[in-house]
Image (spheres, helix red, strand yellow):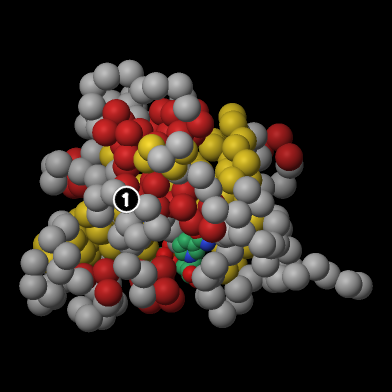
Amino acid sequence: MILPEPNPPDVKIELESEGVNQWRIFQDQFFSSTPLSDSPLKTVFDPIRRSTVDSMMVVGQLGQTMDGRIATVTGQSRYINGHSGLVHLHQLRALVDAVVVGVGTVLADDPQLNVRLIEGKHPARVVIDPKGRLDPKARIWSDDGVKRLWIVSNGLNLEPPKGVKIIQLPMVDGHMEPAMILQSLSSEGLNRVLIEGGAETISRFLQANCLDRLHIIVAPIVMGSGRASFNLKAIEHMDQASRLKVKTHLLDSDVLFDCDLSSARIRIN
Ligand SMILES: NC(=O)c1ccc[n+]([C@@H]2O[C@H](COP(=O)([O-])OP(=O)(O)OC[C@H]3O[C@@H](n4cnc5c(N)ncnc54)[C@H](OP(=O)(O)O)[C@@H]3O)[C@@H](O)[C@H]2O)c1
């Protein structure tokens, strides 16, 4: 079998037209109280501007292959998405108050979780790490002026890196309630939140009905093996599977599935 090149050629997304920085104008409007002007950016991001449930807006995001993989068997995920898919992720980061990841992602990728591909403010960085497995030298803790939160289980005695705040939460059956995690973020003033992975973390928020939206960015890649996007309870019949309400957007060679989960989202605050 002859396969095409491993990665499709990237096409740069047009954020500037006729010398005007459309992204900057959009961001200014997004954070104001005025309605957004009609534009492709409005079509994609207006749904994450205001929650329909309470004062929180929780968005999950995963970049995956066409066969539902977010990383290789060794945990390598850089980069599944093309340039436009990555720009979309950085746009999401610029529009939220905080980015949350599970400790598995930080151990695998040592990510920075800041905004680099476009203009925008860096969000607060939050890691869910009940056992305190994270290296205090991880790049996520770099002091660049943003809030950094280390969520660990109650009673864990840790020396946090300078400027990093520890939040202790109770564990029930080896699990922290996603709603409780979100409440603790809200009490820190972080109300628009991006859950950026990995599979285990997103799955827990999804199962707990704690996501308003889920952005799945599908790249034209078939991996054939690797880590699945979700880790959910096994089902036997198709009628037990969730069929989601989605809007699709083309991001050059990637496709964004914007899933609306707000009708199932529980109240957080
Ligand atoms: N393609 C993408 O968009 C994307 C995005 C992010 C990550 N990734 C890839 O995904 C892989 C990592 O994903 P993963 O599923 O293995 O790990 P993960 O979701 O990043 O982290 C899972 C771990 O975080 C802790 N955790 C998360 N939520 C918790 C909760 N509600 N209560 C208690 N503990 C909680 C647990 O830590 P303990 O195990 O210590 O209990 C859990 O095992 C990496 O290979 C990374 O490259 C891909």
Element marked by disc 1: loop
Residue at the (35%, 60%) spot, across then down: 116
| Relative side of 184 to 216, left or right | left
The amino acid type found where label 1 is placed reads Glu
Question: Residue 119 at x, y = what percent?
Answer: 32, 50
Quadrant containing ligand 1 reads bottom left
Question: Residue 205 at x, y = what percent?
Answer: 41, 47
Q: Which residue is mark 1?
A: 119
Which residue occupies the extreme right position in the image? 1
| Relative side of 25 to 12, left or right | left
Question: Residue 101 at x, y = what percent?
Answer: 36, 60
Question: Residue 23 at x, y = what percent?
Answer: 38, 40
Q: Tell me which corner region of the image, top left, top right, bottom left or bottom right, holds residue 7.
A: bottom right
Residue 206 appears in the picture as rendered: no
Which residue occupies the extreme top position in the image? 35
In the picture shown, does residue 152 fall above or below 246? Answer: below
Residue at the (46%, 38%) spot, across then down: 17
Residue at the (12%, 75%) spot, across then down: 161
Count of picture labels? 1
Q: Tell me which corner region of the image, top left, top right, bottom left or bottom right, holds residue 146.
A: bottom left
Q: Is mark 1 within 8 Å of ligand 1?
A: no
